[in-house]
Amino acid sequence: METLSGFQENLTAIAQRSAAIKSACSNEESTKLYLVLPVIGALGYDYTDPFVVQPEYAADFRNEMPERVDYVVMADGNPVIAIECKKVGTDLSANRGQLRTYFSALQTVHLGIMTDGIRFEFFVDCENPNVMDQEPFLTLDMEAATRSPIPADVIEALSLISRSNFHPDVIAEAAEERLVAKRLRAVLMQEVREPSDELCRLVLQRVGMRNVRRTSIQTRYSSLIRSAFEDALVLPVLDKLRSLQARKTPEIAQEVETAQRIVTTDRELAVYRYVCRRLAYLAADEYQFAAVERVQHKDYVGKFVVYYERERKGRLFDFIEGSNGYDKFIFPEPFGEIITNSMSDIDQALKTTFTQRIRELASAKASEAKQLQTA
C-alpha cells in the first residue's frame, strides 16, 4: 500500500470529487458506481476483479430469492467484508439491520461497511461473533474531508482495512480500542457538561475535601468543577494557538505593530481566550471542537475582531472595550449589538454564529472545488 500521507491525499481527492458530483447521483446504482467504488479502490481492492470484489453476493439461508449484499470483498475464496450501499442522503442508522443480517448469514464476514457514498460506517463483531456491533467503530465522512484533513487516527484505522494490511484479528483489536475510547469520550463529555455527584465527590476528595454535603456539591462545587473541566479541556487548543502565534517572525510582528500603532489590551486577549474556551465547551461534535483551532483575532484602532478562518466571511463579532465596565459585542444579524459586563451573555450568539460560519465556509469551499474541476 502507498504511504499514509499518499493514502490520505488520495482519499481527499476522492472526497472533493464526490462532493462535487453527489447531486448527480440520484439513485442507488449511480451512488455505487460513482461514489462507493472509488473508495473501495482506494483501499486497494480491485473492483474489476471478480475474485477480489463481487457484486450482489447471496447472503441468506434461503435458496429461493435470497438476500444479496451489494458488494463483498473476497479472500481465499470467502467473503470477508460486506458492503451495503444506499442512495446519497439516506439515513444509514435506520438501515443497519440489513447489514446486521449479513454477519449472521456469512460466517466468514467480520467486517461490514454501511454507506451512502458520502458517509462510510465500519462495523465489526467485537461483542459477539457473527453478531454485528450496535455502533460503528469507525466513520469516514467524505464531505467533512473537503473542509478539513481526515484525522490521522481515521487514516491509520483505514490502513488496517486496506488489502495490503487486512487481518481480521488486528482489525478486531483496533476496533475494540476505538469503541471503548469513543464511549469513554461520551461519558467524559457528559460529566463535563453536568458533573455527577459521584465524580464531584471524587474530585473534591483528591483536593483534600471529604464529607462534603450533597446540597453543597449541587449549589456550589458542581459549577466550580465544571469550570475547571472547561479550562482543562481547551488547554491543548490554546497551547496550539499560542505556538502558531509564536511562529510569526518577530521582525514582521514588530513592523506591523509599529506601522499600525495598535496595542492589544489584556481585556481583548481575555475575550479571545474566553471565546476559545466557550466554543470548545459548547461544540456540538468533534468537528466543531477541532474547528476552534482556526478561530483567530485581529486588532484595529477602536475595535478587536474575532473570526473563523477568514476575516470577512468568517467574522464572528467585533469587540469594543468599554470604559465603564460594560463592553460592546457586535454580532451579525439577528443578534446585533450586545452590551454587557458579563461575557456569558454572548454564549448563544457566539455558538449560533460559529456554527453558521463553519457551514457557510464549508459550502464556499465545496463550490470553489467544483468550479476548479469544471474549469
Image (tube, rainbow, N blue to C red):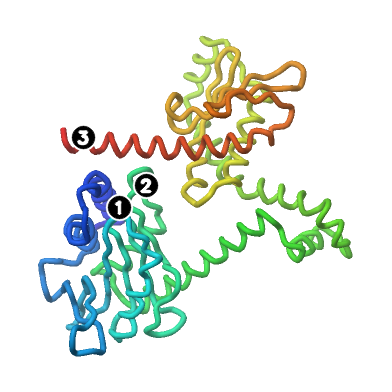
Q: Position of residue 260 (x, y in %)?
A: 53, 11
Calculate the distance from the C-alpha at mark 1 to the C-alpha at mark 2. Answer: 8 Å
Q: Residue at x 24, y 69 (%)?
A: 164
* Quarter of the image that includes the C terminus: top left
* Local secondary structure at mark 1: helix
User: Toward which corner of the image does residue 331 lie, by quadrant?
Assistant: top right
Q: Amino acid at mark 3?
A: Leu
Q: Which residue is mark 1?
A: 8
User: Which label's residue is closer to the chain start, 1 or 2?
Assistant: 1
Relative to 112, residue 89 above or below: above
Q: Position of residue 112 (x, y in %)?
A: 32, 72
Along the line of sight, the residue nearer the viewer: 218 or 264: 218
Q: Which residue is mark 3?
A: 372
Q: Amino acid at mark 1?
A: Gln
User: Toward which corner of the image does residue 202 lie, by quadrant?
Assistant: bottom right
User: Which label's residue is closer to the chain start, 3 or 1?
Assistant: 1
